[in-house]
Amino acid sequence: MKMLQTTLVLGGARSGKSVFAEQLIDHSALQRIYLATATAGEDEEMKQRIAHHRNRRADGWTTVEEPLALVDALTREATRGRAVLVDCLTLWLSNVMFAGRDPEIEARRLTRFLGVAKYPIVFVSNEVGMGLVPETPLGRAFRDAQGRLNQIIAAAVPQVVFIAAGLPLWLKHSPEES
């Protein structure tokens, strides 16, 4: 069995990226931690999405909900014998922005953590720059911040895969995988 490496899984909405990320971890012999960044609030559709994700996962996953303090949660959860799935960076970024925090500072904090992280983390993130240009300044600021976040995380992790129509296209492999 090959060793799980920290990986960024990118894709569009409903591309299959979360399922792919779950399968990466399911095939490891590690304890599985699902670090959820979504908050449903009063949004019924988001509540249904969250329930769908929970119901789809196999037994043996421990769910940790953390919409904002991602690095703190990773510090606690990414330990020996565990693999952490962060689903997803896109919702985390929107939480950061709505909380009035600087996305660049938070992204740098995350990449500093990745520089010292010893155990595998699989990040899921949306590729939002391939669609229509958002109409609003906030939408454009979010799209730009998401693109920058994806770039810096991709540079900081050993593996990056793009999912389209449920199929993986490996963009970056770790030296161990070459």
Image: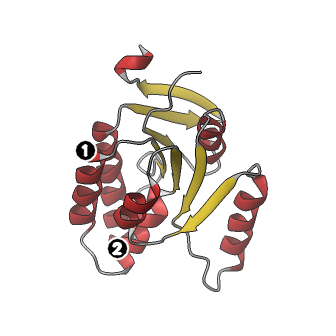
Q: Quadrant of residue 54?
A: bottom right
Provide residue 80's location: percent of width, then percent of height: 46, 45
Establish if 102 lies above or below 171.
below
| Residue 11, numbered circle | none
Q: Which residue is mark 2?
A: 97
Q: Quadrant of residue 21?
A: top right
- What residue is rendered at 35% in x and 19% in y? 175
Q: Residues within 10 Å of mark 1 (few under 14, many from 20)?
A: few
Indicate the secondary structure of the residue bearing disc 2.
helix
**Res 134 visible:** no
Count up the numbered dots.
2
Establish if 78 lies above or below 166.
below
Establish if 24 lies above or below 143.
above
Indicate the secondary structure of the residue bearing disc 1.
helix
- What residue is rendered at 42% in x and 65% in y? 73
Which color scheme does this rendered protein use? secondary structure
Q: Quadrant of the C terminus?
A: top left
Q: Earlier in the sequence, mark 2 or mark 1?
A: 2
Q: Residue furthest front?
A: 80
Do the residues under discs 2 and 1 have CB atoms within 8 angstroms? no
- What residue is rendered at 60% in x and 83% in y? 41
**Distance Cα–Cα, label 2 vs label 1:** 24 Å
Provide residue 167's location: percent of width, then percent of height: 63, 30
Q: Which residue is mark 1?
A: 115
**Res 49 visible:** yes
Q: Residues within 10 Å of mark 2 (few under 14, many from 20)?
A: some
Q: Nearer the viewer, residue 42 or 111?
A: 111
Q: Amino acid at mark 2?
A: Met
